[in-house]
Each structure stands twice: as structure tokens, then as C-alpha cells.
Image: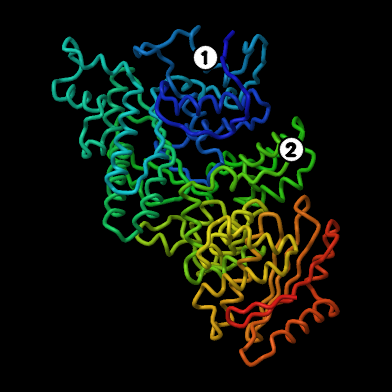
């Protein structure tokens, strides 16, 4: 019936979206959705379409952690609602259209073979299918709208809008002298958008204007999808801070942009905005055209919960027709998010695990340079945060008596806890009962995210000693490789270079230091610590996960005074470790794959380090 010229050499689970049909960014996104239909690693989330259609709101702001399928679902919506037309803006005939088979199912010719696509769940809903292929679509990604200055960010935004208008080549016909659809002023305005010569103030209502043009051309209301809406804000915070004039200017610019795009857009049928962090950017309240025009859906809302991320039911279904052989392993590494009675798994990581049949550190390997990652790493450098972050890295819970569903743009830096939850780095355990002052419990959901915390602690260690990433790795690897003498020598060199580690250094400095060094191994190890506050000593236990080694490390450290004999104290601690029953030793021995325990006694006196 159809010929899809797709080369499916790799699994593309969740891609990036861009402009309309002729945009290369957009093409990548659509191939992403289509390719998953052919790979067999496909989870049907098409009933999201039905839910959007049956709700009274016109606009939906949906925020979920990165790589939970936001871009993927937007692409599905685009393919479902979108009209199919040629370069001249003429609608294709029924025989020429290709999107129907993606949802209704049918036989597809590909690479000289026949493939039978199953119908998606949405095809059973007649009311929803009556909207199939009926609307012009505007699809926009703000992922690349960032820069080192406000001028650069604004120019990137203008370039993004220019590329969007360029993806509708048939609009050029409206500029002809023979065309009377637009008056001369409107022709000049459209020409500026097509040529990219428009001024900054025209950014505010550009999508409302494009919606009008598409409505007039196709005589149908527009669907408008914006992805990564929060990236410009995160980038501006990283560059300027949330108290700067540049940051406030950018926030106001995008507030006006979203107000025109959604709240005042009379040509809009449905709009969906997605991102990671729930900022107060898209205006609420009633619009001129509808009393309740927008629904905000966050990670903690019941609405749309089952459409983002994989549910446990999805994992069980994948197990039935893929080569998953250990659901518990997947749960331990990629599950652990409990939302409104559902357990949610990180979809991108699960797909990679099935594809490669091995654990895949999805959060770290591909997306470590994303703005949200850089933003979260700042938390590890904020004074006073390490104590709480170390508790989390050790698998413990922290407790808060407040939690904001929306992150304040006036003080982002003070709201790291909420941001960690929205970004998928913490699982929020809701209060068991409603009280005036609810107690919120937070913990790391799984081993993969714990590995992301390990990356944060390496960042802290690098910053503490003013060393590079490679130097930090080399230092910590000395401990893992049991090169204890070299480890002690390097530790001393690093401490000498930091003024606060003098003979008057406070005890808590060493607790934070040793906890961070241990936690930086969290990607492949379980870590725990015991701090004997006021006793000038502490203990760390580092247990390798399966496939990450068989040597566990039990460290006891002591902070000594100048008049004490550090050598004798370290020797006594080592004897104590070896011969006295310890909770940590019992914990290590419960891991059957551990074949060896390295006991380390470590003493500090200012920058001096003694290790046995």
C-alpha cells in the first residue's frame, strides 16, 4: 500500500521536534515515531489524543522529567491531527496520504518486504478519529534558544521563528501582487518573517499571526505544539542568575509571547506545551474565548500520568514480546517513581536496556550537557546542600514540610528541592494524611538516578580541589584499585591546596569531604556513611553492584588534633575495624557477589593524611 523509505539502523526512542513538514529537525522527530512502530519496542500511548480531545481546555502545559516521552508524544499528536499537503499547500488525495496507516494499522511495503502494522488504541474511538488529519499544525522546539548574552538568545529565538515560517513555502504566494488575500501592510509583515528581517517586537504575536494565515489558507483551526518551553529560562538562569535584569527581561518576553500564542489566539483548536520544570510562564485564568482555557499537568497530577514514562503494566507487556528476562533488574535500575498509584519507569533507559541487553546509564551517557543537568549540578555547589544530598545518595529519605508545584521565577536558586522532583531526580512520597502542615518525604528512585547524583558529587570534589574531571577520576580510582599509598599521597597534595583544611579545620568539613568522595562512586556502588558527630570520627562503606566489581571498601576516618599521635590512632582504628563486629561489615557480607573487603583506616590532621 505504501512505501516508507526508512533505514532503521538504530532505535530512535525519543527524538527532538522542530518546525513543520520540511524542517530537518521535524523530520527526525517524525521518523522517531514511525521507526518505533517498526522496531517492536513500542508502547501505545495514543489514548492521550482521546483525553486531550475530551477535556474542555484548549491548552495543556505538561511538564515531566527529561526523556519521559514528551517530544515523542508531541510528534504523535502532530501526525494524528496534521493535514497532509504538498509544497504548494494543496491537500493530498486519500491515495497520497500516508499517516492513516500509522494509527488505523495495515500492510506497509518497506525495503522489498511487507510489514503489518497493528492498529493503535485510538483507532477504536470514532469521535477522536473524526478529528484525524483535519488541522494545520504548528510545531516548534525551543531547545536551541539559548546563548551567552540576551542579544544572542533573542537572535536565536528570531532564527527559530524564521525557520518555522520558512517551512511553509506556500505562504510565499501571498506576497504576489496578484494576491488580494493580504493588504500591503500584511504582505510586508509576512515578507519580513519569511526573509528573517522582522524586529524583536514582532516575536510576541508571531505564532498567533501564523495561526491566522494557516486558518485562512486551510479553513480549519490550528493545533499548536511547543516543546522544551523551559530551556530558554534555564539557560538564562545559568548565565545571568534569577535576579539580573537580563533574566527578568527574558521572562517578560516569553510571558508576552505565550499570552499571544495561546490565551489570545482565536484560531487555536488545541495547544500542547511541554518541558521539564513547571515555571509560571504561560498565563492562567480565563481568556477572551474560553473561561477555562488551560490545564497545567505536572509530575504529581493524576491527569496524563499513564501517558508519560512506562507504567509497570507497560513493562510486563514488553516482557511478553521482547527479550527482557529480568523485570526486577529493570525496576531496580529504571523504576521507582510512584505517581498517583502508578509505578513509572524511565522509558528511554528501558528501551536502551532492551536494545543492548545491558544496563545503560542513559541519564549520564548522552545528556550530561543539557541545561537541566548543568542547572541541577549547581545544587551540589550551594553551601549547606551537601548534607541533604549525601543522605539522598546513600539511599535515605529527606523530609520537607513544604513543596511547590510551580517553581518561582523570582527565586529559582532557593527551590532546588522542587526542581529535583520535577526533573525526575527525586521521588516525592506524598503525605499519608492531610494536615495543616503536610510532611513530604523525598528519596532517589533508582540506581540510574543515583549514578547521576554521583556525577554531582564528582563536580563538588572537582570544585573543592580546583581540579579537572580527569584528575578527579584518577584520584578516586586510586582507592577503587587499592593503590592506598598513592591515594594517601594524592589526598595530602589536594588538601594542602585548600586553605580551609588547616589544623583548625572543623570536623564537619571532613565529614562532607569523605561523604562526597564515597558518593562520587555511586554510579556502580552502593554507599553509606556513619558520622559520629562530636567524636571526630566517621565511617564509609562502599559496596560494588553486580557487574561493577567484587571488592567492597570499609573506611573509618578520624580527625586528629596537632598534639595527638596520628599514627597510633590510625593503627588503633584499623585494629578496631578488623576485630570488632560492625554493622557495615554485616551489610557488605549480605551481598553474595562481594569476594573481598578492603579495610581502610584514615587519619586527618589539617592537610596531613595517614592511611593504613
Q: How is the image coloured?
A: rainbow
Frontmost residue, 335 versus 54: 335
The residue where tag 2 is placed is 357
Q: Residue 404: percent from the left, percent from the top?
A: 46, 60
Frontmost residue, 547 versus 168: 547
Quarter of the image for residue 103 reads: top right
How many numbered circles are shown?
Answer: 2
Which quarter of the figure is the N terminus placed in?
top right
Q: Residue 39: percent from the left, percent from the top?
A: 66, 26
Numbered label attached to residue 333: none
Structural distance between the alpha carbons of marks 1 and 2: 33 Å
Residue 314 in sight in this render: yes
In this view, 125 is above or below 100: below
Q: Position of 498 compared to 342: left or right?
A: left
Quarter of the image for residue 538 reads: bottom right
Residue beneath the point at 76% across and 66% down: 553
In this view, 188 is above or below 397: above
Q: Secondary structure at mark 1?
A: loop
Frontmost residue, 61 versus 574: 574
Q: Position of 193 compared to 298: left or right?
A: left
Density class for disc 1 (Cα within 10 Å; few <14, some 14-19, many ≥20) is: some
Among numbered discs 1 and 2, the one appearing first in the sequence = 1
Residue beneath the point at 52% across and 28% down: 76
Contact between marks 1 and 2 (CB within 8 A): the answer is: no
Residue 284 in sight in this render: no
Residue beneath the point at 67% across and 48% down: 335
Q: Nearer the viewer, mark 1 or mark 2?
A: 2
Which quarter of the figure is the C terminus placed in?
bottom right
Q: Secondary structure at mark 2?
A: loop
Amino acid at each position: 500500500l505504501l512505501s516508507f523509505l526508512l533505514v532503521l539502523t538504530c532505535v530512535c526512542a525519543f527524538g527532538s521536534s522542530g518546525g513543520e513538514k520540511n524542517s530537518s529537525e521535524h523530520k527526525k522527530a517524525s521518523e522517531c515515531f514511525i521507526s518505533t512502530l517498526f522496531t517492536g519496542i513500542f508502547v501505545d500511548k495514543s489514548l492521550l489524543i482521546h483525553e486531550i480531545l475530551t477535556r474542555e481546555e484548549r491548552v495543556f502545559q505538561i511538564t515531566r522529567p527529561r526523556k519521559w516521552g514528551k517530544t515523542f508524544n508531541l510528534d504523535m499528536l502532530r501526525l494524528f491531527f496534521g493535514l497532509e499537503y504538498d509544497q504548494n499547500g494543496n491537500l493530498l488525495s486519500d491515495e497520497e496520504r500516508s499517516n492513516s496507516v500509522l494509527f488505523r494499522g495495515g500492510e506497509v511495503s518497506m525495503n522489498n518486504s511487507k510489514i503489518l502494522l497493528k492498529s493503535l488504541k485510538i483507532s477504536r474511538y470514532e469521535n477522536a478519529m473524526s478529528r484525524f488529519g483535519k488541522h494545520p499544525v504548528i510545531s516548534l522546539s525551543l531547545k536551541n534558544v539559548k546563548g551567552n548574552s540576551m542579544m544572542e538568545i533573542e537572535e536565536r529565538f528570531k532564527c527559530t521563528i524564521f525557520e518555522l515560517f520558512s517551512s511553509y513555502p506556500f505562504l510565499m504566494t501571498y506576497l504576489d501582487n496578484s494576491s488580494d488575500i493580504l493588504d500591503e501592510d500584511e504582505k510586508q509583515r509576512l515578507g519580513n518573517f519569511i526573509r528573517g528581517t522582522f524586529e524583536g517586537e514582532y516575536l510576541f504575536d508571531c505564532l498567533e499571526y501564523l495561526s491566522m494565515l494557516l486558518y485562512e489558507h486551510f479553513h480549519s483551526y490550528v493545533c499548536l505544539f511547543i516543546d522544551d518551553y523551559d530551556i530558554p529560562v534555564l539557560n538564562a538562569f545559568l548565565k545571568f542568575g534569577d535576579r539580573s535584569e537580563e533574566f527578568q527581561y527574558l521572562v517578560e518576553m516569553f510571558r508576552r509571547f505565550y499570552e499571544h500564542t495561546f490565551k489570545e489566539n482565536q484560531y487555536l483548536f488545541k495547544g500542547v506545551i511541554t518541558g521539564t520544570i513547571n515555571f509560571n510562564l504561560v498565563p492562567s485564568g480565563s481568556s477572551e474565548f474560553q473561561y477555562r482555557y488551560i490545564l497545567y499537568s505536572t509530575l504529581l497530577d493524576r491527569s496524563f500520568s499513564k501517558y508519560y514514562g512506562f507504567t509497570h503494566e507497560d513493562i510486563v507487556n514488553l516482557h511478553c514480546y521482547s527479550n527482557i528476562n529480568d523485570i526486577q533488574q529493570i525496576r531496580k535500575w529504571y523504576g521507582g517513581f510512584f505517581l498517583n498509584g502508578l509505578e513509572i519507569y524511565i522509558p528511554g533507559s528501558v528501551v536502551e536496556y532492551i536494545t543492548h541487553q545491558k544496563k545503560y546509564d542513559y541519564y549520564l551517557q548522552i545528556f550530561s550537557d543539557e541545561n537541566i543537568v548543568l542547572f541541577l549540578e549547581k545544587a551540589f555547589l550551594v553551601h549547606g546542600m551537601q548534607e541533604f544530598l549525601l543522605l539522598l545518595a546513600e539511599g535515605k529519605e529527606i523530609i520537607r514540610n513544604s513543596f511547590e508545584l510551580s517553581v518561582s521565577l523570582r527565586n529559582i536558586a532557593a527551590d532546588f528541592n522542587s526542581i529535583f522532583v520535577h526533573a525526575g531526580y527525586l521521588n516525592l512520597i506524598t503525605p499519608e494524611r492531610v494536615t495543616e502542615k503536610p510532611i513530604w518525604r523525598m528519596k532517589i528512585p533508582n540506581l540510574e538516578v543515583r549514578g547521576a547524583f554521583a556525577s554531582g558529587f564528582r563536580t563538588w570534589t572537582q570544585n573543592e580541589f580546583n581540579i579537572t574531571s580527569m584528575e578527579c577520576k584518577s584520584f578516586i580510582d586510586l582507592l577503587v584499585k587499592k593503590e592506598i599509598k598513592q591515594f594517601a599521597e594524592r589526598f595530602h597534595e589536594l588538601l594542602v591546596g585548600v586553605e580551609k583544611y588547616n589544623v583548625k579545620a572543623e570536623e564537619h568539613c571532613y565529614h562532607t569531604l569523605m561523604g562526597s568522595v564515597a558518593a562520587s562512586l555511586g554510579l556502580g556502588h552502593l554507599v553509606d556513611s556513619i558520622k559520629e558527630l562530636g567524636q571526630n570520627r566517621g565511617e564509609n562503606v562502599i559496596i560494588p553492584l553486580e557487574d561493577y566489581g567484587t571488592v567492597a571498601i570499609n573506611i573509618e576516618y578520624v580527625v586528629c588534633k596537632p598534639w595527638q599521635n596520628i599514627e597510633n590512632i590510625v593503627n588503633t582504628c584499623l585494629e578496631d575495624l578488623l576485630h570488632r563486629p560492625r554493622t557495615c561489615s554485616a551489610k557488605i557480607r549480605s551481598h553474595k557477589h562481594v569476594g573481598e573487603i578492603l579495610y581502610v583506616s584514615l587519619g586527618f590532621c589539617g592537610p596531613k593524611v595517614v592511611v593504613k
